[in-house]
Image (cartoon, helix red, strand yellow):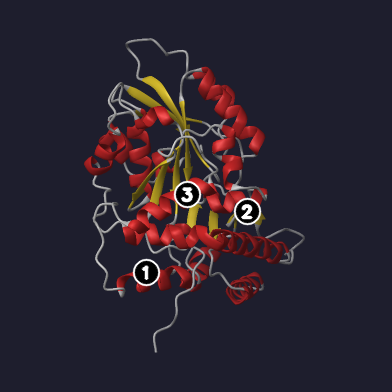
Amino acid sequence: MTNILRTFASDNYAGVLPEIMSALVKEAQSRSHARAYGHDDITEEARHVIKQVFNSSEDDDSIPGVFFVFNGTGANVLSILACTHSYHAVICSDISHIITDESSSPETVTGVRLISIPTDENGKIILEKIEEKLDCIGDMHAAQPRMISIAQPTEYGTVYTIDELKQLSALAKKNNLYFHMDGARLFNAVSSLNCNLQDITTAVGVDILSLGGTKAGMMYGEAVIVFNPSLLKAGGDTNDPLKFRHKQVMQLASKQRFIAVQFLTLLQNNLWKKSSEHSNSMAQLLKKRLESIPLKNNKSLIRITKPVQTGAIFLEIPREWYEPLSAIFPFYMWRRKNCEVRLMCSFDTTEDDIDQFIKKIHELAQN
């Protein structure tokens, strides 16, 4: 009998929410054909639900623009393309996903330059550091800043407050920059802040959002959600330029309804909330159990290095623990120098997973 693999590596390792799988199977077995490339009823319904969830303009049916894509890199690349030309620059943190985990695709595909700036100890972008990079605006010899991109939550799993987001948005608008949010785990941030989805997107002036579905329990699929109506127009052209970009970057699914039906299921009946609240609560439980590890020779064997606000826990462990622990529950080494690792909880993390992991730590601590 094959052993079941359980991990704290990434929510990408997890399976699929049963409700999502049921929706996919139901649509697959319906025997009904549907128009391709997003012209079907399910995709249209999903777009309508997204508009309602984000409380967008009732006066303009085109807002927000919704573009379903295959993956997070595709969502971020399409978002950058929507806001920039090849002579532009995107300001992001030095640990952001677009600069550390998406190879060189954002720069290769879009032609822009990514300008990374230091973050504070909790992974949040620093306003003063952004301002230092804006002196070159208007200088023909420099790539022109056009977008500020942040991740919510950050790569450390920490969460920008609503006030912090408003400050970033105000800085962007003051300098004629677009404000992009990489929301691969946005649902976790919303649950952490105990707010609504619009409270940290439309209400704070986000122009364009990469909304994650896969990490929330979908099989695959993300969405680019465009709140700024100017991004859906090309000068005086009445055609939406993003629909051409969508195809150009190879993110236009022919059977788009199978991405849309997942988002529809996730957003209806607050399934996203159930998923994100569970992963967040499991991280809090794991943190509590880790903090209970006894001292050895009056010294703590582990140290939690970042605030635990969503599903991620960052901690330093004894170097000799990494191999035996990760052999049982795989997880990522974050920084080898001080043996800082990342543990990630997902929608299907169980208390038993945590019990087994802590049990192994106790065994190692006694050696």
Name the kind of residue labelled 2 in the image. Ser
Q: Residue at x 57, y 47 (%)?
A: 197
Instruction: From the viewer's perspective, tell me whether residue 35 is left or right of residue 146.
Output: left
Instruction: From the viewer's perspective, tell me whether residue 219 is left or right of residue 130.
Output: left
Q: Is residue 115 visible?
A: no
Residue to which mark 3 is pinned: 50
First in sequence, mark 2 or 3: give its number. 3
Residue to which mark 2 is pinned: 191
Q: Residue at x 57, y 74 (%)?
A: 353
Residue 262's disc is none
Residue closer to the observer: 303 or 117: 117
Q: Measured along the vertical axis of the image, is residue 313 above or below residue 151?
A: below
Answer few, some or many: residues within 10 Å of disc 2's Cα (few below 14, many 20 plus, some between 14 and 19): many
Instruction: From the viewer's perspective, tell me whether residue 332 is left or right of residue 354.
Output: left
- Residue 301's image quarter? bottom right
Residue to which mark 1 is pinned: 24
Quarter of the figure with the C terminus: bottom right
First in sequence, mark 2 or 1: give its number. 1
Quarter of the figure with the N terminus: bottom left
Q: Is residue 255 visible?
A: yes
| Most distant residue in the top direction | 139
First in sequence, mark 1 or 3: give its number. 1
Tell me the CA gap for discs 2 and 1.
26 Å
User: Which one is in front in this view, the residue at disc 2 or the one at disc 1?
Assistant: 1
Name the kind of residue labelled 1 in the image. Leu
Tell me the CA gap for discs 1 and 3.
19 Å
Q: Measured along the vertical axis of the image, is residue 95 above or below residue 194?
A: above
Are the two marked residues, 2 and 3, in contact with CB atoms closer than 8 angstroms? no
User: Which one is in front in this view, the residue at disc 1 or the one at disc 3?
Assistant: 3
Answer few, some or many: residues within 10 Å of disc 1's Cα (few below 14, many 20 plus, some between 14 and 19): many
